């Protein structure tokens, strides 16, 4: 895993202004890549996650176990597609990204950081609901000026299946009424979160989207051993 620390300049969430020292280590971040592990051998397509994590009072808002359980749930639910994920890079976010309060801040997170090849995942301390008062666990977001540029934003309060739900959106799925689907949203349903899956129809749809993303070189699979 590549660890990167430094400032990027852009309209929002862009200027590095840390007032307190980071934790020990070059970037101040735990080794999220080692904790989450490599793509399982059974996966034919291994996709890289480029991670960005906000830091509060010198401490990253999430520990490596938190990332590992998000990636583990994603790999489990994507296994039928023979797709898996691993963390290929991690960067510290500037302190003004500790709260992502509005649409402009969501745009600002990725506008200066997005690139092809990997899926960009931003972890913040608080992710506000932009439609009504309150906060949310995660969101799949398109840059409003460049809608082919997409990324995932997670709040540190997310549940362990939030990443895989947002990856469902990333691969083209809307919310679902099917209680067994991980794409179910909102009120508690009879199927516990840990037992939810992608339905076969959802898997077919995601396979088609994945093929388009690979064919257009928006995503590049990592070499397999
Ligand atoms: Zn959703």
Image (cartoon, grey):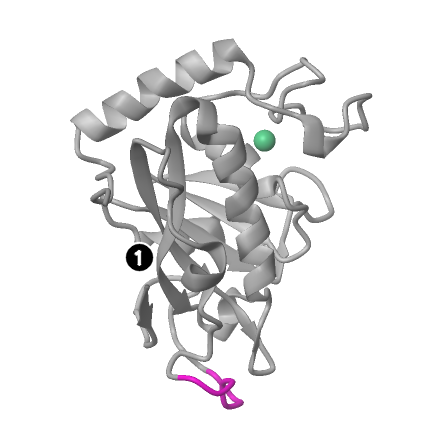
Location of the N terminus (image quadrant):
bottom left
On the rendered structure, is 121 left or right of 138? left
Q: Residues within 10 Å of mark 1 (few under 14, many from 20)?
A: some
For the residue pair 14 and 46, the one nearer the viewer reads as 46
Disc 1 is placed on an element classified as: loop
Whether residue 143 is visible, yes or no, is no
On the rendered structure, is 83 left or right of 98? left
Residue located beneath label 1 in the image: 113
| Magenta segment, prevailing SS (helix, strand or loop) | loop
Residue at 68% x, 18% y is 180
On the rendered structure, is 195 left or right of 106? right
- The image shows residue 47 at horizontal and vertical percentages of 32, 41
Residue at 51% x, 74% y is 95
Location of the C terminus (image quadrant):
top left
For the residue pair 113 and 33, the one nearer the viewer reads as 33
Q: Quadrant of residue 208?
A: top left
**198 to 217, vertically: above or below:** above
The residues colored magenta run 18-25
Looking at the image, in which quadrant does ligand 1 appear? top right
Whether residue 36 is visible, yes or no, is yes
Per the image, is 24 magenta?
yes
Residue at 60% x, 57% y is 66
**10 to 103, vertically: above or below:** below
- The image shows residue 10 at horizontal and vertical percentages of 32, 64
Residue at 64% x, 46% y is 160
- The image shows residue 161 at horizontal and vertical percentages of 62, 40
- The image shows residue 185 at horizontal and vertical percentages of 68, 27
């Amino acid at each position: 895993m590549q660890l990167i620390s430094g400032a990027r300049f852009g309209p929002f969430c862009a200027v590095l202004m840390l007032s307190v020292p980071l934790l020990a280590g070059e970037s101040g971040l735990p080794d999220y890549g080692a904790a989450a592990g490599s793509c399982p051998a059974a996966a034919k397509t291994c996709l890289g996650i480029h991670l960005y994590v906000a830091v509060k009072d010198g401490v990253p808002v999430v520990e490596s176990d938190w990332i590992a359980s998000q990636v583990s749930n994603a790999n489990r639910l994507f296994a039928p597609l023979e797709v898996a994920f691993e963390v290929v890079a991690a960067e510290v976010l500037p302190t003004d990204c500790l709260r992502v309060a509005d649409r402009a801040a969501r745009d600002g997170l990725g506008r200066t950081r997005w690139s092809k090849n990997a899926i960009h995942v931003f972890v913040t301390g608080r992710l506000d609901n932009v439609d009504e008062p309150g906060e949310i666990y995660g969101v799949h977001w398109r840059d409003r000026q460049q809608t082919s540029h997409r990324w995932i934003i997670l709040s540190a309060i997310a549940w362990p299946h939030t990443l895989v739900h947002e990856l469902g959106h990333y691969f083209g799925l809307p919310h679902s009424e099917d209680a067994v689907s991980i794409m179910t949203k909102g009120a508690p349903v009879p199927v516990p979160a840990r037992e939810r899956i992608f339905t076969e129809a959802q898997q077919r749809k995601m396979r088609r989207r994945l093929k388009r993303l690979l064919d257009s070189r928006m995503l590049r699979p990592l070499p397999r051993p």
